[in-house]
Amino acid sequence: MKRVRYVPIEGAPQDFEGSIMVTGFMGFGLVGFIATDFLVNKLEPQKVGYFVTKYLPEQISYSEKNGIELPFELYFKEVDGKKLLILMNRWTPVSVERFAYADFVIKWAKKRGVEALYTFGGLDNNYREDPKERLRWVKTSYYKGPLPEAKPMTGGLKVVGPLALILAAAETRGFPALALLPFCESMRQDPRASAVGLEEFAKLVGLKLDVRELVERAESIEKELDKLRKMMEVGSGRESHYM
């Protein structure tokens, strides 16, 4: 069996010439995962295929809308005149084939005439140089499209994990790729950071995208955390009595 292969869904469109691909992974703040999951649920694209690895992660999920959901699914939809491919990574490839997966995706996209890859990741808030900063970015030398007004990622910082591997694969295969890295809370899910990344992506490619749902989710999480913090402060001020 090949290390990685693409399995099209019978009857689904397979002409992706001129499309753009969007993806993300379960990194800091779950920024990439939340962003792509939001696009799949908000835009309701058509599931067109799967990427299957030799050591496929032993997990699936199920929804009434999408049926059985495999670890690595591809969705397609034309939105605002753009052909959009969404690679939904519901899990992370096992370590021994992470680069093989990233490299296959890039090779596959290039062969199919995909114009560029946009991917999301989180950048720890501790590296923010200015409180007003929202994100940084990293691109391959082959990406010639529009760039955010924000600064690129600071020299010396490292991109790690599957996001680093897909950028490495894009660079070595001469493929245009741009990673959007919103500042995030690295130790918990951060929908607000995902909203920042999606807003920037929509601006760059000319899409209309309402991300208020993610902002509301973030506000709900922040309220619960604030409530928990206050409860802990009250608890720490009480005397403890033991019998």
Image (cartoon, grey):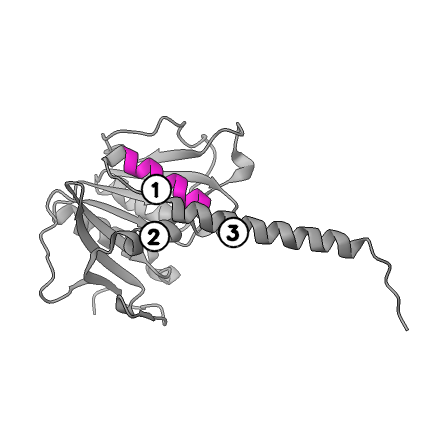
The answer to which quarter of the image holds residue 117 is top left
Provide the residue designation for mark 3: 220
Q: Which residues are magenta?
A: 192-203
Q: Disc 1 on helix, strand or loop?
A: helix
Number of other residues with Cα within 10 Å of mark 3, as a class: few under 14, some 14 to 19, many 20 or more: few
Q: Residue 81 in the image: x percent, y percent? A: 14, 40
Provide the residue designation for mark 1: 198
Residue at image coords 51%, 51%: 220
Is 71 colored magenta in this rendering?
no
Is residue 166 shown above or below 41?
A: above
In whole angstroms, how far apart are the C-alphas of marks 2 and 1? 9 Å
- Taking the image as drawn, is residue 84 in sight? yes
Is residue 202 shown above or below 232?
A: above
226 left or right of 139? Answer: right
Q: Who is closer to the viewer here, 141 or 27?
A: 27
In whole angstroms, how far apart are the C-alphas of marks 3 and 1? 19 Å
Marks 2 & 1, CB-CB < 8 Å contact: yes
Is residue 150 shown above or below 38?
A: above
82 left or right of 128? Answer: left
